[in-house]
Amino acid sequence: MSVLLVEDDAAIATVIVAALDAEGCAVTHCDTIAARDALLEGERFAALITDVVLPDGDGIASLDRVRARHPALPIIILSAQNTLDTAVRAAGTGAFEYFPKPFDIDELVQTTLKAARAVAPDATAAEAEPEALPLVGRSAPMQAVYRMITRVLGNDLTVLVLGESGTGKELVAEAIHTLGQRAAGPFVAVNAAAIPAELIESELFGHERGAFTGAVARQIGKFEAAAGGTLFLDEIGDMPPAAQIRLLRALQSGVIRRVGGSEDIAIDARIICATNREFGPMIAAGQFREDLYYRINVVPITLPPLRARRDDIPALAQHFFASAAAEGLPRRRLTPDAMALLCRQPWRGNVRELRNLVFRVALMARDALVDAPALAALLDDPASATASRRADLAEAVAAWLAEQEPPAGAIYESALAAFEAPLFAEVLGRTGGNQLRAAHLLGINRNTLRKRLRELAPLGRG
């Protein structure tokens, strides 16, 4: 089968040609849009692989000419411009697949072989402006997220967004809504965990006048409010069990009924759910219904924590500094050392924590150019946290000395015992009382552990 490759990076082109040649493909290589169009005029190809940034133009923007003449030609897009915008633009062309660089050559080859035997799908998403997109980052983990988003833009499949708190799950839901086929409709977000079980039907499905005490007028619920658009059920992992039953019934039947009403109302909203919980343990413990889990887990999209995508931190920081300036805060920039310090943070609160820190820096920094010491003073960096823990420990030691008043000559042994006893108890607790495993964790001999435990017993009684 014949494949047309449009790639201006000679090294990448050489690798692709060699890999496809090994699979029996006849590859024709060119490096410009003009050469591509000329070749497509005179030859028939089973698949087209094209880069985006080419010497004479945009490889995606110019594909309308290819589609006009060769509507069934499968197209595979490669790009080093690894943003959600690029992924969406690629999907908008009806591309068979989109590969951010660097890519897995074996995956590219197998996809090309598959594409050559298929017909390219219709375009499903319109081109979007970069500034309109809510997600920022070009790291490999985010590329996987972008690719999953583009796969659901042209359908109404239920999406389950998974990830730690602060990773941007609602932003993913908003991106799917804004870029998808329901963009003209409303986006309704609701915290599923915040709705009491006794109010879930009224909040989600609405109620008729007189349905219960206080129902003085008809009220539509979230499902009806989201008609024609998207209903985002956040924190669904914390939804009360009784509420889970009512939600499952609605999703299974595809209809809702207002509380106190007799009319069945068809659900006309895309459903996107999100949680920071792990469903396996919850299902095993009976905290979440397994049948509801399978109902909402049609297309899972897992957001990586910020510590797994540190390459994105500079771009995110710049984005948030720009947002802060747009809200009237002073414009700030970080020195290279300050940016390096930012990238080393643990970011347990993920992107939300980074945003809050950037806004704090924008508000409180004295200079427009913020260096590492100035940044360290405004964040909970590891060095500061360590110093704080040491200060806390010093205070605890001082308080222990004042309270225990060990006799002269016994302070060291008593203090060591005071530290060892809770340490041994903690480690033994983690090992279920297994002294052999506890000794291994502590890095001491089991006989030494036994000896110290016997020695500490009298001190503990004293």
Image (tube, rainbow, N blue to C red):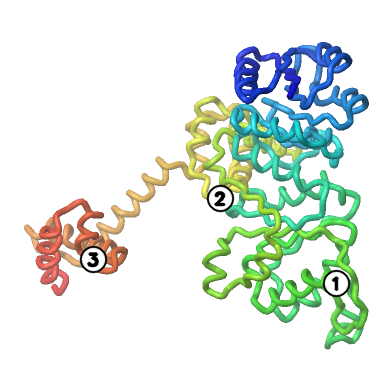
Kind of residue at badge 1: Val
Disc on the earlier residue, 3 or 2: 2
Disc on the earlier residue, 3 or 1: 1
In the depicted structure, whether residue 389 falls above or below residue 431: above
- Marks 2 and 1, Cα distance to the nearest angstrom? 38 Å
Q: Give the residue at mark 2.
A: 349
**Residue 57 location, x and y as percent?**
81, 16
What crowding class fits label 1: few (fewer than 14 Cα within 10 Å), some (14-19), or many (20 or more)? some
| Number of on-image labels | 3
Q: Which mark is residue 255?
A: 1
Q: Tell me, yes or no, if residue 401 can be seen here.
A: no
Along the line of sight, which residue is nearer the eye, 115 or 431? 115
Kind of residue at badge 3: Asn
Disc on the earlier residue, 2 or 1: 1
**Residue 92 location, x and y as percent?**
83, 36
Kind of residue at badge 2: Gly
- Marks 3 and 1, Cα distance to the nearest angstrom? 56 Å
